[in-house]
């Protein structure tokens, strides 16, 4: 019987989950300031949501978990968030109620990649999509949001890199220029890139194998081939970023691997010491054809996605004081079944007052229970001993000051409330 986790997956253990909870909370808090609401779509979709004719990225062609269900339907575990969100947007005709729909999502994605630090087969992303409006101010808002988010996390040494691919006309011109540029080097490129020259030369620029080849280093950039409209659009985006006063850099070589981007593309990179090779925390861009391709009207959108494991790694590498594990206010020690009933009522009353309280559920010795309370770092220990009970009191010990006091049974909750308030 297999008892190991699936390759490329990991467990979030109870002493680690508080970081995830805090990160998710921050995401929700910050995104609501941008007037974004959460959307939750299924983890599996019909395969054609991802396997679209125009989509030729490695993520979709080589890395998806595809399977047929018991009724022979072709399904895919989502490798990314955007396509499912757009499918839901189209299917539920969200475009009829709002001209701009701003949503965010948090959830696991699945990709059959080679696992390494910061790269898993099940990983979490949170992302946003703003669908329905094409305007440079909106592109800027999404970049500003990404910047605001990492700044609020307290991450230092994080860079926002922005570029444009231009509109359809500029992008086509750029693709042509890349084909002419790379064709003389075809024999020297990796087998994937040989195919990419004709299918999608942009992706050569993101190739993990050829990225040091002179032809890649010296390739033309999208900025060289922008038409006037695209240039104006990008200048506007930049002027909005400047108006907000965020820091960013223009990265002429940034294209991002996906096929559907146009106009603004951007990436968030961690330049944190000791962070490691997988240093892209997230990225995104504007897309024009996706809504139409998934059966909706001709509307554009813009979005980004952050990898949550990498955000947590960046938080750790930046030594940000991020979140605390659950704190135990009170631990009750009892030595008999009868007294456990008193303890049960006491715990119920404390929890009713929103204190974190617990006890031992075995017949462990007094010493054993005391040690357990200290190991759990309880702030107070209530000792309900037989002797004390006969006298109508319990002993309460402050584990920090080691001061122990006797308190009347009926006053225990009040006593702890007063102490814990301070
Ligand atoms: P992508 O959807 O490929 O643009 O990725 C967006 C972000 O998701 C990346 O910058 C990473 O932070 C994260 N990411 C992508 N793939 C993985 C993976 N296999 N494991 C962990 N994080 C990932």
Image (cartoon, helix red, strand yellow):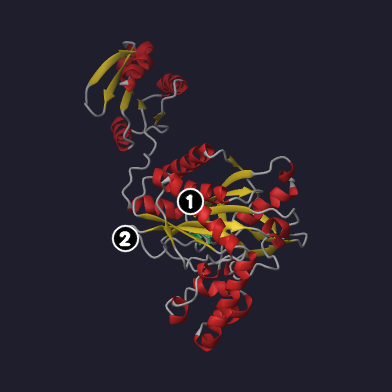
At horizontal 39% and vertical 56% (from top left) the residue drawn is 159
Tag 1: Cα neighbours inside 10 Å, few (<14), some, or many (≥20)? some
Q: Quadrant of the N terminus?
A: bottom right
- Answer with the quarter of the image where residue 52 lies: bottom right
Q: For residue 399, which quarter of the picture?
A: top left
Classify mark 2: helix, strand or loop: loop
Q: Which residue is mark 1?
A: 239
Give the percent coordinates (x, y) of residue 345: 45, 19
| Quadrant showing the C terminus | top left
Q: Residue at x 52, y 53 (%)?
A: 237
On screen, residue 149 above or below 60? above
Query: Which residue: 56% across, 56% down?
Result: 233
Name the element at disc 1.
Answer: helix
Identify the residue at the far right of this view.
71
Q: Position of residue 44 (x, y in %)?
A: 66, 55
Q: 105 and 238: which one is in front?
A: 238
Q: Residue at x 25, y 17 (%)?
A: 405
Marks counted in the figure total: 2
Q: In the rendered structure, which disc, 2 or 1, sits on the residue that comes first in sequence? A: 1
Query: Residue pushed farthest front?
Result: 228
Camera-nearest residue between 403 and 61: 61
Q: Dot 2 corresponds to which residue? A: 274
Using the image, determine if residue 189 lies above or below residue 270.
below
Q: Nearer the viewer, mark 2 or mark 1?
A: 1
Q: CA distance from mark 2 to mark 1?
A: 34 Å
- Compared to residue 199, the image places residue 85 above or below, namely above
Mark linked to residue 131: none
């Amino acid at each position: 019987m297999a008892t190991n986790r699936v390759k490329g997956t990991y467990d979030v253990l109870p002493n680690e989950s508080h970081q995830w909870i805090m990160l998710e909370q921050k995401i929700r808090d910050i995104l609501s300031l941008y007037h974004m609401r959460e959307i939750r779509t299924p983890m599996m979709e019909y395969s054609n949501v991802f396997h679209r004719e125009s989509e030729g990225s490695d993520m979709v062609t080589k890395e998806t978990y595809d399977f047929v269900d018991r009724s022979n339907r072709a399904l895919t575990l989502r490798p990314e968030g955007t396509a499912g969100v757009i499918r839901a947007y189209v299917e539920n005709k969200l475009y009829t109620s709002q001209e701009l729909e701003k949503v965010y999502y948090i959830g696991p994605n699945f990709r059959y990649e080679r696992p390494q630090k910061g790269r898993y087969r099940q990983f979490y992303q949170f992302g946003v999509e703003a669908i329905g409006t094409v305007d440079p101010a909106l592109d800027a808002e999404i970049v500003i949001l990404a910047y605001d988010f990492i700044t609020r996390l307290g991450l230092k040494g994080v860079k926002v890199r922005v570029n444009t691919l231009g509109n359809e006309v500029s992008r086509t011109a750029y693709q042509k220029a890349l084909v002419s540029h790379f064709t003389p080097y075809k024999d020297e490129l990796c087998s994937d890139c040989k195919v990419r020259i004709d299918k999608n030369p942009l992706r050569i620029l993101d190739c993990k194998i050829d990225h040091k080849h002179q032809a890649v280093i010296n390739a033309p950039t999208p900025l060289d081939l922008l038409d006037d409209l695209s240039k104006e659009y990008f200048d506007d985006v930049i002027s909005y970023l400047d108006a907000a006063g965020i820091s960013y850099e223009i990265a002429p070589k940034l294209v991002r691997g996906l096929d559907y981007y146009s106009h603004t593309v951007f990436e968030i990179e961690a330049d944190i010491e000791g962070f490691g090779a997988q240093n892209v925390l997230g990225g995104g861009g504007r897309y024009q054809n996706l809504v139409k391709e998934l059966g909706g009207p001709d509307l554009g959108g813009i979005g980004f996605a952050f990898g949550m494991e990498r955000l947590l790694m960046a938080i750790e590498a930046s030594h940000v004081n991020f979140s605390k594990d659950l704190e135990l206010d009170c631990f009750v020690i009892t030595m008999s079944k009868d007294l456990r009933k008193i303890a049960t009522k006491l715990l119920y009353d404390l929890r009713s007052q929103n204190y974190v309280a617990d006890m031992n559920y075995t017949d462990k010795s007094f010493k054993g229970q005391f040690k357990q309370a200290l190991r759990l770092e309880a702030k107070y220990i209530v000792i309900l001993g037989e002797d004390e009970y006969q006298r109508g009191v319990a002993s309460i010990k402050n584990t920090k000051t080691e001061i122990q006091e006797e308190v009347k049974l009926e006053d225990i909750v009040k006593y702890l409330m007063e102490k814990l308030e301070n």
